[in-house]
Image (cartoon, helix red, strand yellow):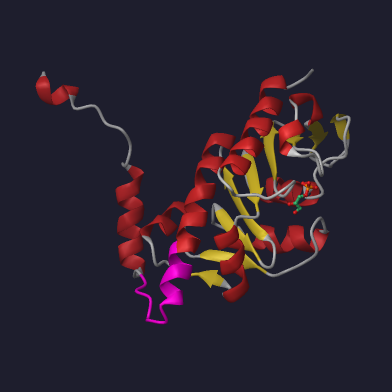
């Protein structure tokens, strides 16, 4: 089986989304780009039953290379994002706060500094039916210069240079939306960070990584 470890990573990512409550049923899909190929979850397969062999390999024009099941209905969306950007992986979920936020705004304001992880305010792509070219276009536009977007009346999407990074962002996106929603429920004005504060947060987070203090003891 070609690209077996990438196919298994797609299965693991789908299970992660399910374990974290970011999807219900067979909602959501995951893909990885490997050179001019796309490894993508199949359509409508319950995640408990999903195996690496169910995950298909397609060309960037959508033609199957090694796939025994129909690919995710969002293959056009994944392909559109790969054509428009150099990202290496895409995850799509139907997490409740992300989906709810997409119903009440066109952009998630920067109320939490974590928005800097996504490149700024997170846009909400206008609604189009799932699996359509219109949805693919709307979401690709909403992702311009961003690592995530909401999909109106539908869910959320994140991208990354690899699957681990794209997947890491999903719970943060859900958290940002959950916090903003809770703040809005109070009916009180929500404090929004300035462009300068966001730029500083982006700077700070660029060095937010486990750092050894060994050098201090030498
Ligand atoms: P698939 O099972 O076809 O990937 O569809 C799930 C989904 O979330 C559609 O947007």
| Residue at the spot 71% in from the left edge and 64% down from the top edge | 138
Determine whether, in the image, residue 180 is placed left or right of residue 97: left
Residue 164: tell me if it is visible: yes
**Residue 188 in magenta?**
yes
Determine whether, in the image, residue 150 is placed left or right of residue 54: left
| Residue at the spot 69% in from the left edge and 67% down from the top edge | 153
Seen from the viewer's position, the closer of residues 167 and 123 is 167
Where residue 99 sits in the image (x, y, percent)? 62, 63
Where residue 213 sits in the image (x, y, percent)? 18, 27
Residues shaded magenta: 179-192
Determine whether, in the image, residue 51 is placed left or right of residue 91: right
Seen from the viewer's position, the closer of residues 66 and 8 is 8
| Residue at the spot 41% in from the left edge and 77% down from the top edge | 186
Where residue 19 sits in the image (x, y, percent)? 58, 40
Seen from the viewer's position, the closer of residues 182 and 98 is 182
Q: In the rendered view, tell whether residue 17 sits above or below residue 175.
A: above
Q: In the rendered view, tell whether residue 35 sits above or below residue 149.
A: above
| Residue at the spot 72% in from the left edge and 50% down from the top edge | 27
């Amino acid at each position: 089986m070609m690209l077996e470890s990438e196919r298994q990573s797609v299965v693991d990512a789908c299970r992660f989304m399910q374990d974290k409550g970011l999807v219900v049923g067979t909602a959501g899909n995951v893909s990885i780009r490997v050179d001019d190929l796309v490894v993508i979850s199949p359509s409508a397969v319950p995640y408990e039953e999903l195996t690496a062999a169910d995950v298909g390999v397609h060309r960037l024009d959508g033609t199957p290379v090694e796939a025994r099941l129909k690919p995710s209905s969002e293959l056009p969306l994944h392909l559109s994002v790969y054509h428009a950007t150099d990202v290496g992986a895409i995850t799509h979920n139907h997490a409740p706060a992300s989906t709810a936020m997409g119903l009440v705004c066109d952009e998630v304001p920067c109320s939490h500094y974590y928005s800097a992880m996504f490149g700024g305010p997170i846009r909400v792509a206008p609604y189009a039916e799932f699996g359509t070219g219109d949805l693919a276009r709307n979401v690709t536009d909403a992702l311009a210069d961003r690592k995530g977007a909401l999909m109106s009346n539908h869910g959320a999407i994140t991208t990354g240079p690899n699957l681990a990074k794209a997947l890491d962002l999903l719970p943060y996106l859900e958290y940002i939306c959950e916090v903003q929603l809770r703040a809005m429920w109070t009916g009180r004005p929500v404090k929004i960070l300035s462009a300068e504060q966001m730029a500083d947060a982006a700077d700070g987070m660029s060095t937010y990584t486990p750092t050894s203090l060994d050098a201090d003891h030498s």
